[in-house]
Image (cartoon, coloured by chain):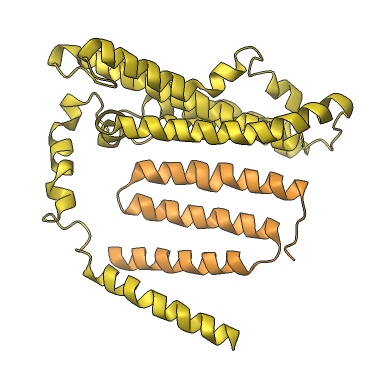
Chain colours: A yellow, B orange
Amino acid sequence: MKKALVTALLIIAAIPFLFAAAALPPHGDPNTPVQTGASAYYLEHGAEEAGAENIVTDVILNYRGLDTNGEVTVIFTGFAAAFAVLLPISLIRSRTEPVSELPASPVVRFAVRLLAPFTALFSIYVILYGHVSPGGGFQGGAILGGLFIVLSAALDPARIRRLIPRQAGPWLRAAAPIAFVSMGILGLILTGSYLGFPTSEAQSAVRTGMLIVIEIGIGVGGAVIFATLFSEMEAQ
Amino acid sequence: MSSIFDATLLLLLVAIALVVARTKDLLAASIIFSAYSLVLCLLWTHRGAPDVAMTEAAVGAGITTVFFLVAISKTVRREK
């Protein structure tokens, strides 16, 4: 009885969705507002005006930079909240009882060591080349954070944790908002508006440089946040 | 041909999502869920969104699965 009711409700709920989907324009139709509005302008002028050959990076960091600035702040706040819950417990635990675990198998350790330098190089490439090809700070940061996690899961966690310096740790975790806001203030000085990128032909190196600084900030911040969350959850 | 490929991936997504929802073993469910991210990543790539595909692969299939696994190892493996 209950199951039949749920099924009926689901079918009733699905009908408007299916009608809405049927009314959508075909994929890639050139006459929709999506194609004729702002996107057309971005595609035409993005590459020479916004500082990055990858139009996605142009939109995310330059045209819609303020949105991304807000998103980065939201993610950092979420991390800070998680950290505030996790840290006190792990501080008590790790001081009193040392965690003794079975070491990973030699095959896993060998594979992790073999792949680690290539993964690190790839993540740096994705971060630094995100303004030309698909990728960018967040993707590269996730790969770098994943590398930290794999290393500390397969090898000695304490040794991997030392890769992130204790003094610089808090600053590195906040690298994304710090880089974004400092570039925003630099834009304020250069053009008179927050996150304003200089648009003239002669200053193309400046705006590309600003984009790369933001990408590096997001990448480093993301990687350190992922690695810290993992090690704090492990230490519970 | 292209739309058949897309339709296959979409149906596969629905099938994987149903399997994840029905699996009681949480370890198995998280691994199957990373397969969901993999299929979604293929779909993004085919639809011409390589940036999103890369994020999906790195975050969806990689980092979130790891966090699920850590959470399972700290709690219980089976759903009641």
Q: Residue A110: in sight, yes or no?
A: no
List x then y, in percent, for residue B11: 43, 69
List x then y, in percent, for residue A20: 28, 69
Q: Quadrant of the C terminus of chain A?
A: top right
Residue A222, above or below B38: above
Q: Residue at x 36, y 26 (%)?
A: A129
Residue A102, above or below A121: below
Task: Out of A141 and A90, give the one closest to the viewer.
Answer: A90
Drawn side of residue A206 relative to residue A49, left or right:
right
Drawn side of residue A213 relative to residue A220, left or right:
left
Q: Residue A22: in sight, yes or no?
A: yes
The image quadrant that residue A12 belongs to is bottom left
List x then y, in percent, for residue A23: 22, 69
Task: Out of B32 and A164, give the one closest to the viewer.
Answer: A164
The image quadrant that residue A168 belongs to is top right
Task: Out of A2 and A95, give the one closest to the viewer.
Answer: A2
Q: Residue at x 50, y 82 (%)?
A: A7
Q: Residue at x 77, y 50 (%)?
A: B75
Furthest residue in direction right, as rendered: A97
Q: How many marks?
A: 0
Q: Quadrant of the N terminus of chain A?
A: bottom right
List x then y, in percent, for residue A78: 54, 36
Drawn side of residue A229 relative to residue A128, left or right:
right
Residue B35, above or below A52: below
The image quadrant that residue A164 belongs to is top right
